[in-house]
Amino acid sequence: MKPSLPVRLTAEFLGTAFLVAAVIGSGIMGERLSGGNVAIALLANTIATGAALVALILTFGPISGAHLNPAVTVSDAIEHGLPWREALAYIAAQCAGGFVGAVAAHLMFGLRWYSFSAHPRRGPSQVLSEFVATFGLLCVIWGCSRRTPSAVPYAVASYITAAYWFTASTSFANPAVTIARALSDTFAGIRPQDAPLFIAAQFAGAFAATALFRWLVPRVRVDAGALS
Amino acid sequence: MKPSLPVRLTAEFLGTAFLVAAVIGSGIMGERLSGGNVAIALLANTIATGAALVALILTFGPISGAHLNPAVTVSDAIEHGLPWREALAYIAAQCAGGFVGAVAAHLMFGLRWYSFSAHPRRGPSQVLSEFVATFGLLCVIWGCSRRTPSAVPYAVASYITAAYWFTASTSFANPAVTIARALSDTFAGIRPQDAPLFIAAQFAGAFAATALFRWLVPRVRVDAGALS
Amino acid sequence: MKPSLPVRLTAEFLGTAFLVAAVIGSGIMGERLSGGNVAIALLANTIATGAALVALILTFGPISGAHLNPAVTVSDAIEHGLPWREALAYIAAQCAGGFVGAVAAHLMFGLRWYSFSAHPRRGPSQVLSEFVATFGLLCVIWGCSRRTPSAVPYAVASYITAAYWFTASTSFANPAVTIARALSDTFAGIRPQDAPLFIAAQFAGAFAATALFRWLVPRVRVDAGALS
Amino acid sequence: MKPSLPVRLTAEFLGTAFLVAAVIGSGIMGERLSGGNVAIALLANTIATGAALVALILTFGPISGAHLNPAVTVSDAIEHGLPWREALAYIAAQCAGGFVGAVAAHLMFGLRWYSFSAHPRRGPSQVLSEFVATFGLLCVIWGCSRRTPSAVPYAVASYITAAYWFTASTSFANPAVTIARALSDTFAGIRPQDAPLFIAAQFAGAFAATALFRWLVPRVRVDAGALS
């Protein structure tokens, strides 16, 4: 019944590739067309990312759970939703997918296949933003997946749509996406030297939410294969 | 089956905190990026608030009912959906959550942890707007929760998305959020001295809708724990 | 089981009042805030109208069918979904609701309670637009309500969201709303002398779609009480 | 149970006509109103197209499967979802519908009934974009329709909403729509001489995704009649 590991890894790879392509590609398009109005560029970036998440989680959720995010995969492994060996393979697939997605976005827009970002994102406000963003994301995932799993695609996409605007960092909330964005000197980029603190804050937020929801909603396996 | 009171209060606290963070945070971001075009700032504020409501009601609805709003909690208590003792605890949790959400938004954007708003919102048009906004909100809640409870997250979020634009006050429609916004000298703020009339109009609108729907849709317990 | 006629008429009255308040109110707000960029004003108007339709059809659909539109009510009566006597009462409630919604919008924004619109909307392109808009609306209603009634709120709201932009008239597609907009000298208004041709085109489009769907999807009662 | 072929062809014709009218019409409206800000015009175009897809797939999906796209129809025939004879009839209906939709859009906006587009869209980035766009579209369709068919309307609409922004070509992803857009010298147009490579890339992307999903999600008939 449950798809084989190679099938699930392919789903994580493809899903994360499309997610990163959506984040970076729509950032490039938004910046090119918006004539310098950053709010309009971010609005386009937001709508594209939220819509992509709905489509990708509906598509890949029934196959691999559509984690598309190492912070989600590690949290799921902590909760015994996934063996640690498979979790590591998931994370590798997500990071590889994110890299391929960034390259695909660059090639579609006629840019060099990769370039290190020069976009600084640092300081306590940014790091706090990533903690809050990922804490909230895992709250949404644990709360929804344990009680109304069929709504997870809409809940996650809606949450990220909101968090793009209510956090100062525009809510990366995903270590694999953060790494891919460090390789893109475009609207959605982040300087490589700023990435480690982002990633640390993301894992910290994810773990805090996971611990809290053990108490708030008694543990049940989150299984993306059951999402629909 | 029904979660314990502390669990439900934590859900109301967290949910209202994220709701206020979304309202205030996206207002700050929108204003910063929109280069003076208030319509674009409000559009971003609207999309973030509506999307946050979808995610938060899906996440916390099955736990506490996801009232996140004293006007909803009091209306529910009037309809015997919640004992009055629990209703008071809900309201305290909502107000505390709203305050923490405002502080979190300020810190994420590098502002002082709180500041009284200087944004005047007064006059009969504004007060009428809040009456209409909250009357409509409770119509949506009673109409949906008694007949199609699984659609409540989408109905409430859609209603508020619309009401941001069709009321002159941008539809606060929530006493706990109003108090929190009085403590934020940002795009979404309201002068503390204007808050009491807003709150009075909100409760009046909520009670009018509650009375009307007793007749329109025969009474059944609205139970957020049953929303999904 | 089926609500009494007075209850259903109240639902049609309230629903149409909120729909018109959303259309006119968000038009005023959009125009005031958008600094002369009509596309941004119409975008706000579109999002508010589409979101209001989701909320209102979810709320009032289970009570009265949430027609909120004389062209829908007459089409339903033609298909024997509603006795003609009740259809006339529905239409009266819709027109009265539309008038009250327009007045409410004006008062919320501090305008005179009504004012005849000076906004010309005429010529064959505009009339063709209304024919196409209402033809499409009834296609969506008949297609969805006969096969997937629970999706009607989302289908209708999505259709109108699109039609605001793909028709030259911004898709009024509703005689009761057209009359109410003639009484509003604001962004969403229409000159009273241009309204009759709009209304004629709307009924013509509705009847054409109704005739076509008799053949496309064999007749079943469309019953808004069954929408959820 | 399954509608007759003429009924299904009428659904494909009407659905594609409305889809093209939405794409071209909203492009005209967006360009006219946006005062030269291309990002705002494309945002309106995106929202109208995505919303139209939700409404059209919900309406016509239960009748004909709502392919509205020769790349989808050919892929479905390859997977034995549709006899080849019917597939050819579907494609003819889609192309005819697309043409009528373009004419309707032009007439609604007071333009000549057709005009060859002068909008160049060429080069490897554009062609790669169409390959990626249609590859992703078919991933979404195969992934969703085989596991959660009732979500297909939302998944497809969300995907196209995102792809308008994350591909450099704004994701035509549909041969029938591409032909129709070649006949429209407006915002959404494409020079006739650039259309063949777009169409070739679209079919290539569709076939690649179809082959991949044979392995990812074991074959089941995709039957649009079962979508709801």
Image (tube, coloured by chain):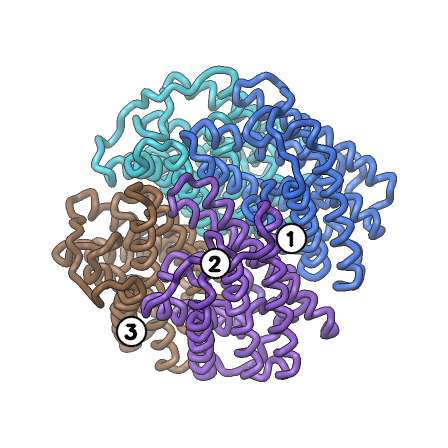
Chain colours: A blue, B purple, C brown, D cyan
Inter-mark Cα distance, 3 to 2: 43 Å
Amino acid type for the residue under numbered disc 2? Ser
Amino acid type for the residue under numbered disc 1? Val
Q: Which chain carries label 2?
A: B
| Callout 1 crowding tier (Cα within 10 Å): few <14, some 14–19, many ≥20 | many
Q: Which chain carries label 3?
A: C
Q: In this view, does A73 lie above or below C91?
A: above
Q: Where is residue D191 in the image (x, y as percent from the top left)?
A: 36, 20
Give the residue number, with chain letter if any, for mark 3. C93
| Callout 3 crowding tier (Cα within 10 Å): few <14, some 14–19, many ≥20 | many
The residue closer to the viewer here, A135 or D61, is: A135
Q: Which chain carries label 1?
A: A
Q: Where is residue C76 in the image (x, y as percent from the top left)?
A: 33, 66
Q: Is residue D85 visible?
A: no
Asked which secondary structure carries label 2, the reply is loop
Q: Where is residue C222 in the image (x, y as percent from the top left)?
A: 41, 66
Amino acid type for the residue under numbered disc 3? Ala
Give the residue number, with chain letter if any, for mark 1. A152
Give the residue number, with chain letter if any, for mark 2. B117
For the point 69% across and 40% down, the residue is A174
